[in-house]
Every structure is written in C-alpha cells, then in structure tokens.
Amino acid sequence: MAFTIIINPVSGGARSGEARRRVELAASIRDGHGNPGDVVVTERPGHARELAKAARARGASMVFAWGGDGTINEVATALAFGDLPLGIVPAGSGNGLALELGVDRNPARAIAHALCAEPRSIDVGELAGRLFVNIAGIGFDAHVASLFNRAGNVRRGFARYVSISGRALLTYKAGRYTITTGGTRIEVGRGVLVTIANSPQFGNGARIAPAARVDDGLLDLVVVDERSRPRTICGLPRLFNGTVERMRGCSVARIREATIQAEQPMIFHVDGEPVQGGTELRVRVHPGALRIVV
C-alpha cells in the first residue's frame, strides 16, 4: 500500500528542529510498514494541496495530512469528490476534526490505526466557493484567524491563539447580518459569531456545535447575537461544557444551504484559514464527499 505523508513543519508552533524530527519519524513509520511511499514537506500556504494532487496523480492509495486543521483542509480539498482516502496525523494548535474523530495524537499509532481502518465517507461544507471539513465562520473567529495568520506572527500554538483571542474580544465590533435558509430569514443585529459547523468543535475541547455530526448530510449554523460583551465573555465557559446553546442570544439551525448577507465585505474562515469575501456568501453541504481512514 503506497501511501504519501504530507508534513507541515511549522504547525502547532513547532520549535526549531521539529521539521527534521517529523520527517525522520514519518520515514521510520513508513519503513516499519514496509511501504514504498513518499514523505514530503510543505514549504508555503497552499503547498499541501499541490502535494496531495501530485500524490493522487502518482496513484497513491492513501494520503496523510500531518498538521493542523489548515493542513487537513488543504489535503482534503484536493481529495474531495474522489475515492482516495485521507488519513490524519494531528499536530496543530486546535486539532478540532482529529479530536472529534478520535485520532490518536501519537503519530505512529495514528498511521497504524488508519492503515487498518475501513474508509468511511464524511460530509464537506462549502462557504463562498471554499471547501471545509471541520468549521467555517464569519465574525469573531474569522477575525482572530486573520490576526493569527498574519505574516508577522511568527509565534504559533494554542497559547498564542488564546492570547490573540483575549485581546481581540475586548475591541471586536459585532456585525449585522441577514441569513436566509430554507425559506426562513434571520436578522442578526449584533452577530459576534456566525459559525457553520460540520463537526462539533473549534479545537482543544471548545464545542461550538455539540450536536453536529460529520456524516449526517447537514451543517449546524450557530449564531451568537450578543446582548452585551460582558455577557458574551461570561458565557464562554459554555463552549467547554457542551451548553453553548443555552447562551443568551445563541441559536442553532441544521441546514443544507444558506445565504449570508452584510452591508460590508465579510472576512470569513474555512478550517481556520482566513479569506476576504464579499457582501453575500453562499453556504452548502456536500454529503459524503470525502473518504477518510481513522
């Protein structure tokens, strides 16, 4: 079974020398399975997608994404709507999808488990033409993603993400949105979060959509129309105990498609990667569009 391992050398705030360690470990795991496959390293944003397409063209039987949700997104978008399955080696700041799928944090075990697993299908979401497999969103999380991914931010990792989020929460201005889904029109006056979830959590146990399932053919639309910033801050612990739906101003809808409109162009994110969008964004789900092995 000729599989390809695509490694993001800087995911999760990796320290100097971590890239070499990951490559050596991946090669050792590959050789231990008697596999003639490739171990390749990303060099820039978007490179994992290119490497996954090249692996598919070479006839790989499986492609592993070794990194965080952003790396998984790039590989997944290259494999979606095909039969080539995705394996995951979690090494990011949040690892939201990997946590929900129960992927082992140990690389050797994660790969071994995937090689023994039967491929299964999961849904893929789409926001403004960009695919996602975990979570996409507009509002505060997209704002934080844009700050976290700025070129000048050389520090990565969960601690850095928390630091950026804490400062941004004090100054972020909630937006006005009109959301249309299934013939229903929703007016959001102070939308601090408009999240479209394929799986339940952002990462690190922060569950924005506890009832979301990756294989139900639906997306969970979670809107937090805040009453006040202090109430929003006080409600944050609900992300970690599965009761976010009880937060004042929070509503959840299960959708197949939706349209989100705003007066100003919107920044959104797909699996933590920020994108500049327009004043109207379309959302839809592609049921069972990705094959995975976990």
Image (tube, grey):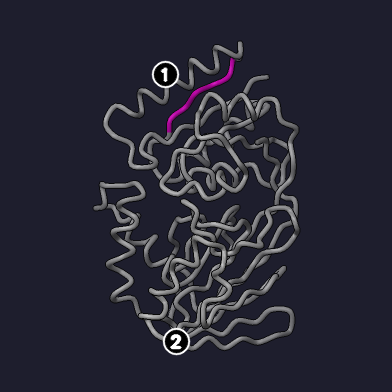
- Secondary element at image label 2: loop
Q: Which residue is mark 2?
A: 227
Task: Give the image location of residue 130, x and y in percent.
Answer: 56, 59
**Residue drawn at point x = 70 percent, y = 25 percent:** 116
Q: Is residue 138 above or below residue 183?
A: above
> Which quarter of the rendered picture does the C terminus lie within?
top right
Q: Quadrant of residue 227?
A: bottom left
Report the span colored magenta: 36-41
- Secondary element at image label 1: helix
Residue 122 located left or right of residue 223: right
Give the residue type that dot 2 points to: Arg
Q: What kind of secondary structure does the magenta stretch mostly adopt?
A: strand
Does the magenta run of residues contain 147? no
> Which quarter of the rendered picture does the N terminus lie within?
top right
Give the residue type that dot 1 points to: Glu
Do callouts 2 and 1 mark residues in contact (Cβ within 8 Å)? no
**Residue drawn at point x = 51 percent, y = 66 percent:** 137
Along the polypeptide, which appears first: circle 2 or circle 1?
A: 1
Task: Give the image location of residue 197, x and y in percent.
Answer: 60, 62
Closer to the camera in the image, 118 or 206: 206
Crowding at dot 1, Cα within 10 Å, few <14 / some 14-19 / many 20+, comes out as: few
**Residue drawn at point x = 33 percent, y = 42 percent:** 13
Q: CA distance from mark 2 to mark 1?
A: 51 Å
Q: Is residue 253 above or below residue 40?
A: below
Q: Nearer the viewer, mark 2 or mark 1?
A: 2
Q: Is residue 287 above or below residue 78?
A: below
Closer to the camera in the image, 100 or 28: 100
Task: Give the image location of residue 141, x and y in percent.
Answer: 43, 65
Residue 250 located left or right of residue 57: left
**Residue drawn at point x = 53 percent, y = 36 percent:** 65
Q: Is residue 205 above or below residue 32?
A: below
Q: Which mark is residue 24?
A: 1
